[in-house]
Image (cartoon, rainbow, N blue to C red):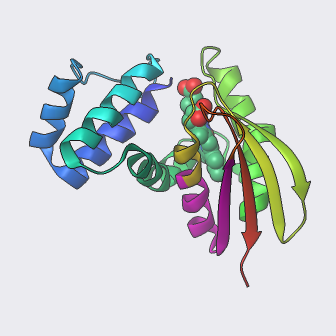
Amino acid sequence: MKGIIFTEFLELVEEKFGLELLDEVLDMSEDEGIYTSVGSYDHKNLVRLIINLSKKTEIDATTLQRVFGQTVFKNLLASLPNQASLNHSSTTFQFIQHVERYIHVEVKKLYPDAQPPEFHFIHTTEAELVFDYKSARCMSHVCLGLIEGCAEYHGDTISIEMIPQNDEQSVVRFNLKVES
Ligand code: HEM
């Protein structure tokens, strides 16, 4: 997984919980905490950090993933090399489709070892977007947070329903509706 995900995560932990707690979580995870945004690392390290942060803070791991997604959205957006491509998407629904058709495609071209999730679109109208999130990394709650961050950025109010399609939650159906 790309280092930017790790550097953003560690920054958020430090900001929300302080350097001392971050150090404790790194120790518990037997992780030296040395990540660069352009490097690539085993995504299991991130899972371990989230689990140990959850143990330390007594906040469940799904909530931690969600908050991470919400806060990382803007920084991921700012990291896009081609900002002009964003002109095509002015709503949350357009943006999510742009992520699948362009942004994550570019990520894979730039970093052949990256494995962003796949979105399979099932139903698309102006008021409703239904799609399946698919990833062996099972980070659907990061996805939830990213969608919330995306909606906030676009000034949209959206209700989000998640329906897991299997036990390990590698496929999760997202049912999004624009609230008037
Ligand atoms: C609504 C917006 C977005 C959603 C819902 C989304 C979803 C996700 C999720 C859930 C992951 C975690 C890995 C997984 O579950 O398999 C991920 C990874 C990633 N995303 Fe996105 N993303 C969004 C926007 C962006 C943007 C704007 C960028 C800008 C470059 C981006 C670049 C990446 C990168 C670099 C990774 C790590 C991939 C890897 O190293 O394997 N994403 N994305």
Relative to 174, residue 54 above or below: above
In the figure, is residue 93 to the left or right of 52?
right
Of residues 137 and 41, the one nearer the viewer is: 137
Name the spot of residue 67 as percent of width and height, x first. 42, 54
Q: Tell whether position 98 is magenta.
A: no
Quarter of the image holding residue 154? Answer: bottom right
In the figure, is residue 19 to the left or right of 153?
left
Q: Is residue 88 visible?
A: no
Relative to 110, residue 89 above or below: below
* Residue drawn at x 63%, y 23% as measured from the top left: 115
Name the spot of residue 91 as percent of width and height, x first. 74, 66
Residue occupying the far bottom of the picture: 180
Give the magenta-colored segment's residue range.
Answer: 145-163
Q: Tell whether position 161 is magenta.
A: yes
Of residues 58 and 125, the one nearer the viewer is: 58
Q: Quadrant of the C terminus?
A: bottom right
Quarter of the image holding residue 19? Answer: top left
In the figure, is residue 36 to the left or right of 129?
left
* Residue drawn at x 39%, y 28% as measured from the top left: 46
Name the spot of residue 130 as percent of width and height, x first. 81, 55
Relative to 180, residue 4 above or below: above
